[in-house]
Image (cartoon, rainbow, N blue to C red):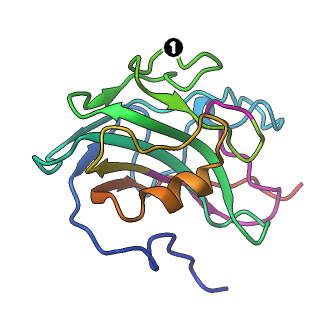
Amino acid sequence: MTVNNPFARLPEVPDFALTSTTVEDGKPLAAPQLSGMFGVPGGQDVSPQLTWSGAPAATKSFAVTVYDPDAPTGSGFWHWAVANIPADVTTLPEAAGDDTGSGLPAAAFQLPNDARAARFIGAAPPAGHGPHRYFITVHALDVADIGVAPDATPAVLGFTMAGHILARATLIPTAETPAS
């Protein structure tokens, strides 16, 4: 199997720093970030806490996406997408991606994920499918409003953002469900 890099065909841009108190790059996700909606034992569908710094001075907004390129769908699986985070916001609290987006700034909104829910859906790799990677990415954008409708898909957000990304910051935790 070839390792899929979801950024391979996008313009190369600089990195900036992304940290979290709830997830670690390269480490397994904790139970809160697993999916209760999809029946993962202990899963709670709680979005991770995120803090970022070092974005370019020209940044006018941010978007956050969580994507699993290893899902057995042919197109991966979008777990979360948030658009129009103001440039002066540099942190999202844990659980910001609940049903109401209670931890998001007023201008920001959640797009429906691949489960068609406008919220964060935790990891749920199929049993025995092996480890999955979850690209948690903050995109620094050169526009204050990315111009997508709240009911757009994360893929439409990604397509619309492609020419507006100044820099990106990514953490890649993992999850695996053992075969029964």
The residue depicted at 30 percent of the width and 38 percent of the height is 144
Q: Is residue 17 left or right of residue 46?
A: left
> Magenta stretch: residue 119 in it?
yes
Q: Is residue 149 left or right of residue 142?
A: right
Q: Secondary structure at mark 1?
A: loop
Question: In front: 57, or 168?
Answer: 57
Q: Is residue 178 left or right of residue 96?
A: right
> Magenta stretch: residue 173 in it?
no
Q: Quadrant of residue 81?
A: top right
Measured as percent of width and height from the top left, residue 134 is found at: 55, 54
Q: Which residues are magenta?
A: 117-136
Measured as percent of width and height from the top left, residue 159 is found at: 52, 62
The residue depicted at 44 percent of the width and 27 percent of the height is 108
Is most of the magenta stretch helix, strand or loop?
Answer: loop
Q: Quadrant of residue 79?
A: top right
Residue at image mark 1: 102
